[in-house]
């Protein structure tokens, strides 16, 4: 077994996976909303899709 290749493949797979999750959060910001506790979901303001992206952050 080539340990250097194994570690390199693991690092690349981790980077690709994390990039996909980050892009999902950027382009679909409400996608992780259901995972939060109900208290946090109720306290958070609703996402206004008509607001400019500079305001939505």
Image (cartoon, rainbow, N blue to C red):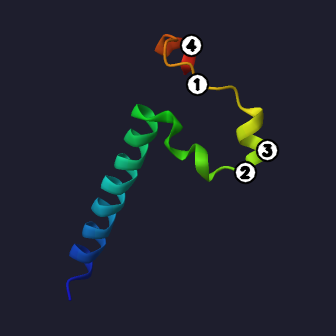
Residue at the image point whose x is 61% and y is 52% from the top:
35
Residue 47 is labelled as 1
Task: Give yes or no for contact between labels 2 and 3 (Cβ–Cβ under 8 Å).
Answer: yes
Residue at the image point whose x is 30% and y is 62% from the top:
13
Count neighbours of disc 2 (C-alpha within 10 A) and say few if under 14, some if 14 to 19, many if 20 or more. Answer: few
Under tag 4, what secondary structure?
Answer: helix
Residue with the mark numbered 4: 55
Which residue occupies the foreground of this view, 2 or 54? Answer: 54
Residue with the mark numbered 2: 37
Q: Please, is residue 33 above or below residue 15 in the view? A: above
Under tag 2, what secondary structure?
Answer: loop
Task: Give yes or no for contact between labels 2 and 4 (Cβ–Cβ under 8 Å).
Answer: no
Task: Give yes or no for contact between labels 1 and 2 (Cβ–Cβ under 8 Å).
Answer: no
Left or right position of 57 against 38: left
Residue at the image point whose x is 26% and y is 76% from the top:
6
Count neighbours of disc 4 (C-alpha within 10 A) and say few if under 14, some if 14 to 19, many if 20 or more. Answer: few
Q: Please, is residue 52 above or below residue 22 in the view? A: above
Which quadrant would the C terminus be assigned to in this image?
top right
Q: CA distance from mark 1 to mark 4?
A: 11 Å
Residue 39 is labelled as 3
Under tag 1, what secondary structure?
Answer: loop
* Number of numbered discs: 4
Residue at the image point whose x is 54% and y is 46% from the top:
32
Q: Earlier in the sequence, mark 1 or mark 4?
A: 1
């Amino acid at each position: 077994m080539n340990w250097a290749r194994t570690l390199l493949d693991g690092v690349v797979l981790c980077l690709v996976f994390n990039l996909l999750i980050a892009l999902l959060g950027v382009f679909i910001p409400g996608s992780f909303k259901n995972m939060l506790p109900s208290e946090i979901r109720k306290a958070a303001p609703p996402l206004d899709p008509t607001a400019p992206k500079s305001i939505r952050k």
